[in-house]
Amino acid sequence: MSRFPEAGVLAALFMGAALGFASAQDAALGEAVFAKCKACHAVGPDAKNKVGPHLNGIVGRPAGSAEGYKYSTAMATKGAEGLVWDEATLAPYLADPKGMVKGTKMAFAGIKKPEEVSNLVAYLATFAPDGSKTSADAGAAAPSEKKAEASSQTPAGPQAPVQPAPAAARGEGLKFGLGRLAGEDEIAAWDIDVRPDGKGLPVGRGTVATGMGIYDENCASCHGDFGEAVDRWPVLAGGQGTLQADRPQKTIGSYWPYLSTVYDYVRRAMPFGNARSLSNDDIYALTAYILYLNDVVDDEEFELSNDNLASIRLPNEANFIEDDRSSEPHSRPGQEPCMKDCKPGKAEITMHAAVLDVTPEDSENDEAPAAGIE
Amino acid sequence: MTNSARPGAASRRAFLKGGLAAGAALAAGSAAAGEQVITEVQDWNRYSGEGVDARPYGTPSQFEAHVVRKNVPWLTSDVVSSINFTPLHELEGIITPSGLCFERHHAGIAEIDPKDHRLMINGMVEKPLVFTMADIKRFPRENKVYFLECAANSGMEWRGAQLNGCQFTHGMLHCVMYTGVRLKTLLEEAGVRPEGKWLLAEGADASSMTRSIPLDKALDDCMVAFGMNGEALRPEQGYPLRLVVPGFEGNMWIKWLRRLEIGDQPWQQREETSKYTDLLPSGKARRFTFAMDVKSVITNPSPQAPITHGRGPLVVAGLAWSGNGTIKRVDVSIDGGRNWQTARIDGPSLPKALHRFYYEFDWDGSELFLQSRAIDSDGIVQPTKDDLRAARGSNSIYHNNGIQTWHVNKDGVIENVEIS
């Protein structure tokens, strides 16, 4: 480990925390910590590469070696230099990814608590390279896995297998008589959309202060501690007053017209890679915290709930207009376009396409040019 | 002779024949030797190839391996929520092969067993219903050819020429034949209540993609499709079920379609507020800009498909389309819009589908500024990029249907440019 002097020191620290004696107890606790990684990494029999490589068999695996995954040059180089992941090398990496592997594309701030890291490594060590549970821990880890799942998943989420039709009544007087009546529980499970007038909001509540903790755990790794975003993940806060600027910054505070959209979207799609894993109260708290990050509220004790959400206005609501493209001069129908001598002089080039890294193989160039899609 | 001896034997024979041919050429003095691909018996002309079962699902020729969708890594933060582009410069006619249709996912490709897929209709209906895929296939079907264009197609070009190739400037576009059921048929089965004015469509993937669609449109020509180009939808196109919203921006064509809800007002979802709204220089933003405007592009020659044959007969080929209906006419300019000639539209002219146009001429080897300009059945003329910027500035991202210019130099090399 002499290649990483700072790593060596940290590793020694963690070793002290009984890392070498990963017990089932540690692994069970580590599973909860793994929630922070789930958005980007998978483990288990069906684990595939996601944002990051799958982590089956990671303890004992050379860095940069998951098949079919495209690593950063930094990680690939570490692997080529002989870095192998074990308790001693994982600890410093998980504590400070960019500190240990400068240039890694793992957009994760790091885990500050040493015991969390050691539990996490103990948990990861229970997965063999093929994703099966290693024999030593198979028995012990299984029950806790079930428990964690039951508590972290919304019971009738969209992933829940749809039950075969109860002997539901066939529609009467319908044209084809196909399909069956939707059950109330089924509609409740899927119909989670929320409108600006508050229609669809579930009963619940959460404060800015609670939201901050949930955000730091589940969102900050991509969206940044203050919603400013890490790398190219979306920015969630700031940008007020930039909409007429050369480079507008469109965020919830500067651009979004309705708060209901924040609640609706975070509930259906975030955290990215682990959607539908938070409770309705968590989402109220997160939405409150996002308001706070955008200076719409300034009190950490502010509580958002189904009672007050629809009454809160975002600053840019009034600036949305209906589609009036047809009023633009060039959109008038029936104009007969010019065919001969339409412009004076010879055409002169005013701008060349900057030749960009358009080939998929060449992703080293990380410079985002003038304008991207969003 | 054993099988393994064949290639060696063949090359030996080729060597002998080559020697003979060379001798003949020498004897004939200045007369060029015949092309070896003609004068020599080729392997494929002598040995039998693979049998019928070698490729149970056929794939393109090994010599077409370069014809693939491509992604532009810097556009988005991660490939799971990203986009790749249709190689328009490699395609013929108006139908896009299923495997080359560009992909845009917000949480990767959902892999759904059709046995586990359900379509629910709820909200302001007489009877909320659930259909299985088998139920859906018992309704009357139709087959329709439609283009699908992402509203952000050409969005990187607002600030000027950026990407070198029509795959990247125009490749968020495809056109296939869909097989499915009219959305109206399904909605009538559930019975839309009179207060219903809007429809929310929702996907089953991990982004639970949602869009609000005006009910008029839903009852007009929308479809719920399970087939494309004669086979099941591809997973990346929403297998087993997607919404088809002809002429409207691609984001509304919800893939992995699982739910349709009727309501009396739009839901203001993230994809119709934060995204797919068009910011203007005034700071105001247009929303619900659904229809895709009249547009065209020359696909060949173009930066990825330069002219390699020198002067003489040249085929200029391109695509034109409009969310309003059919294409009435396409004009082509070779001098950067000073003079225009009307191109020839070939193949079917179907509403809200791609149209193929050609303009053939003798290239004299001089510099060209190629442009195309489409006019649709509503009589609307494709604008210039300057027209668009004058009206919208350059921060509106979406709905850039401006006229594209390709600069051809004397060597036939082509670049994406903007001109005076």
Image (cartoon, rainbow, N blue to C red):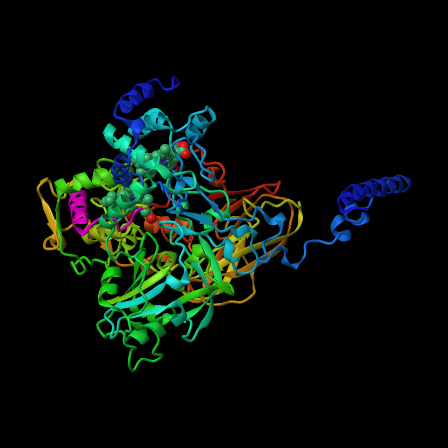
Return the x and y of residue B335 as percentages of the image width and height. Answer: 54, 48
Q: Quadrant of residue B78?
A: top left
Q: Is residue A90 magenta?
A: no
Q: Is residue A276 magenta?
A: yes
Q: How many marks?
A: 0
Give the left or right position of residue A293, taking residue A4 as reference: left
Q: Is residue A173 above or below residue B420?
A: below
User: Which region of the structure is painted magenta?
Assistant: A274-291
Identify which residue, B382 or A288, lies in the foreground.
Answer: A288
Q: Is residue B155 visible?
A: yes
**Image coords of residue A154 (percent x, y):** 23, 53
Instruction: State the predominant SS element of the stretch in magenta.
Output: helix
Q: Is residue A66 above or below residue A102?
A: below
Q: Position of residue B407 (x, y in %)?
A: 53, 44
> Is residue A293 among what the camera can see?
no
Of residue A369 and residue B51, the one placed in the foreground of this image is B51
Where residue B288 sits: x, y (%)? 29, 58
Question: Residue, x 25% and y 36% (percent of image)?
Answer: A25
Q: Residue furthest bottom?
A: A173
Residue drawn where x is 10% and y is 53% of the image: A308
A276 left or right of A352? Answer: left
Residue at image x 32%, y 33%? A121
Residue A277 or B393: which is nearer the viewer?
A277
Residue B91 is left or right of residue B290, and the answer is: right
